[in-house]
Image (cartoon, grey):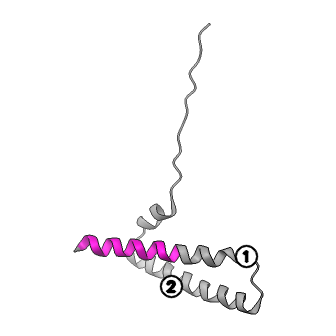
Amino acid sequence: MARKKKEVKIVKKQSESEKIREMDVATIEKNIADLKQELFNLRFQAAVGKLENTAQIKKNKKQIARMKTILTERANALK
């Protein structure tokens, strides 16, 4: 009896930092400004008591940090 081999396709999911690295500097800076505005609004909602998803604050902070890190890496690579 012959066995058939199964072909397994491996699909690599693109990470957040890989997506950011594909962007140009102007787009990253625009996204940072948008995220900072959203973070301000989330903090305001939290202070008033209207914020339902408190985890969104942490997610925004981490996304801003990722973007700033990549901008710093690019700046240091030019030196």
Q: Is residue 14 left or right of residue 72?
A: right
Q: Which quadrant: the C terminus?
A: bottom left
The residue at 68%/91% (across/down) is 44
Assess whether residue 70 is covered by the magenta stretch.
Answer: yes
Vertical placement of 17 versus 54: above or below?
above
Q: Regarding mark 1 in the picture, which secondary structure is present there? A: loop
Residue bearing mark 1: 53
Q: Residue at x 24, y 73 (%)?
A: 78
Magenta stretch bounds:
63-78
Nearer to us in this view, 4 or 47: 47
Q: Report the residue marked by disc 2.
A: 33
Q: Which amino acid type is marked by label 2?
A: Ala
| SS for dot 2 | helix
Residue 67 picture quarter: bottom left
Label 1 neighbour load within 10 Å: few <14, some 14-19, many 20+: few
* Amino acid type shown at disc 1: Asn
Q: Position of residue 10 (x, y in %)?
A: 53, 40
Q: Position of residue 24 (x, y in %)?
A: 39, 72
Place of residue 25 in the rendered image (x, y in percent of width and height, measured from the top left): 38, 76
Q: Is residue 64 above or below residue 19?
A: below
- Disc 2 and disc 1: Cα gap in Å? 21 Å
Q: Is residue 31 magenta?
A: no
Q: Residue at x 55, y 33 (%)?
A: 8
Residue at 47 percent of width and 81 percent of height = 30
Q: Earlier in the sequence, mark 2 or mark 1?
A: 2
Describe residue 76's horizontal placement relative to residue 64 as left or right: left
Q: Where is residue 63 drawn, in percent x and y?
A: 53, 73
